[in-house]
Image (cartoon, helix red, strand yellow):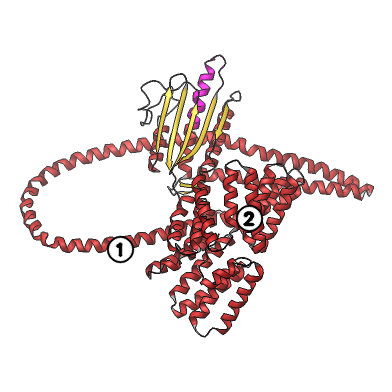
Amino acid sequence: MTRICITAFLVSSIFLSGLSQTKQIIDSLHDQLAMARNETTRIEALVQLCLFHRLGNTDSAMLYGGEALKEAETANYVRGQIEALGFMCIVKEQQGNLARSLELGFRALQLARENKMEKYAGGALDGIGEVYIDLKDFGQAMPYLQENAMVDFDSIGLGYGYFDMGNAFTGLGQLDSANFYEHKALGVFRDFHNEEPKVFQTLGDIQLKSGRRPEALDYYRESLEISLRKNEGRAQAYAYNRIAKLYMETGQSDSAIAYAEKGLQVSRMITQKETIQEAAALLAELYEPKDTRESIRYLKMADEYKDSVFGAGNIEAVQSIVVQEQRRQAEIEAAKAAYQTRLKQYALAGGVAVLVIVAIFLYRNNQKERKARLLLRGKNELIEKTLDDLKSTQAQLIQQEKMASLGELTAGIAHEIQNPLNFVNNFSEINGEFAAEAETARQKNDLAELKNILEGIKANQEKITFHGKRADSIVRGMLQHSQKSAGQKEPTDINALSDEYLRLAYHGLRAKDKNFNADIKTDFDDNIGIINVVSQDIGRVLLNLYNNAFYAVNEKLRTGVPGYKPVIEVRTRKSGNKIIITVSDNGNGIENNTDEKIFQPFFTTKPSGQGTGLGLSLSYDIVKAHGGEINVRSKKGEGALFTIQLPTGKL
């Protein structure tokens, strides 16, 4: 996937050969490095060594890239700095260090733009685009990929630009556009007599998402064949994992395990964290019905690598770098605006004299108005005091509403945490029995039986640890939701947030009414990905809508309508640059002519004492603060449908 920007001779050579040819080029670069007679030649050799070593030894690639950057800075060789930073950006993305990759890429772009040398920034643009693809922020990746295609319009880099754009469109679910750009990429690569295996992988992904598994498998196999012939470890790892996943989905578990293990082996050799995590996750799922211990081992490995790339600390680091870059761009725009402002000031200087004359004339009028303002000030102070009292009362009612939501959340949390605690208690009790049996076996000197009992104790202990950590994770997650929101947006999985609060709301009602049951239906769009919102606030909106829906169906159920069965439906989908969340119920619906009033403060359809009338008003304010919309459609006796529209809120 990585864009290559090198001399015409090296481009021709790498595209016409496999491992032996690549080794010859690397050896030739080492000879060039040893015989370099000037700083520029030496720096260019180091940059190319960084580029070629990324295919099989990322540590060496970073070593050569760092040395090239250091020497280029000493020699004030800007082109060398830009290319070294760009290729190190690509290598760091491959290693899974997304924050460092963005830092290097943005630094390269800054140098290129300050020195009008954008044509050497292709590596940085490609690396930044791939980081955003890793984060599933395909919309943010697209501008960098499009700029990359324009920078490399007359080179092999155009093929990689088209490939990455197709990859991004695949992630967005726009399969026709994805197929178009991948075939354009194939055309560019053929013009340069090159076969790029990862293009065939993306074509396979497109076929798979279109429901054509045989065609997808053919593309994956072709990708694997090319990557093996060219000894491209990166492409091999992706191909093995995709074939393994396809076999798993078709029930061919043995073949799936074989390919996944190959994918894991190759990924470890080249230190590619993304494919290590993919392969480990596949093996954990494949071994689950066969060997629980192996499944847990691979699951731990997958979680470890996932945390190393997408852990909270790493995501925060990525956000920090993105914010810094946005601020830098804002400062540049501010400087331009300041320059334009100064020009306007000079042009307006001549009008100052006229304004002075007008000011003298207005001064007399202002004296008269001053007396009127003094009179109004007293009235304004009285109005402000009244407004402060009103705000204080409203704040108290808002706190009441939040405490009511917290009470229902608490009931849901109790149910959520009970399951892992039951597992802990049960396995602890079994271990106690095993301990007694172990003592008996020891007294009988039955070593075989003693060994079996100890293995059982060990297995149970692993389960106790697993479910204990699960309970701890639930508690920590709920503590985060209970914290006061500081209004700071953060990357959030809307589908997971919607599902989590739905379960908590349902269990909260069940805790108060054991006889209550409802049919809950969900339809979550996997293409939404991660968006930037204040998760605690959006959670409060969802919880309020869920509680209202459960209240509505429960009230209708109590009326004894023949054959009535409560149904709650929650759906999410992506539409353009908006995220749509709908919550519907088949309860009693809302009274006619109240739809327009329902979001007004203190308006409620519940009986006196059962609602503050602020829940939907707060929800309306939260959604509007996110730049979104919330509305309701209802028919008396048939239920209600609430719709939330949020901007994608990308990083």
Q: Which amino acid does label 1 sit on?
A: Ala
Please name the residue that numbered disc 2 is placed on.
223
Residue 86 included in the magenta stretch of the image? no
On the image, which quarter does residue 343 sit in?
bottom left
Residue 511, visible in the rendered structure: yes
Residue 322 place in picture, x, y as percent? 45, 58
Q: Is residue 477 above or below residue 130?
A: above
Q: In the image, is residue 68 above or below residue 183?
A: below
Q: Is 111 drawn above or below residue 307 in the view shown?
A: below
Q: Residue at x 70, y 50 (%)?
A: 283
Question: Tag 2 or tag 1, which sits nearer the N-term?
Answer: 2
Q: Which of 440 and 326 is in front in this view?
A: 326
x, y percentage for residue 485?
Answer: 45, 45
Residue at mark 1: 335
Q: Quadrant of the N terminus?
A: bottom right
| Dot 1: element | helix
The quadrant holding residue 409 is: top right
Residue 221 or residue 457, whichever sits in front? 221
Residue 647, how many percent across, how many down?
A: 42, 43
Q: Give the range drawn in magenta.
A: 546-565
User: Of helix, strand and loop, which one carries label 2?
Assistant: helix
Q: Relative to the observer, which residue lies in front, 486 or 520?
A: 520
Q: Which of marks 1 and 2 is in front?
A: 2
In the displayed structure image, the side of residue 94 where residue 485 appears, left or right:
left
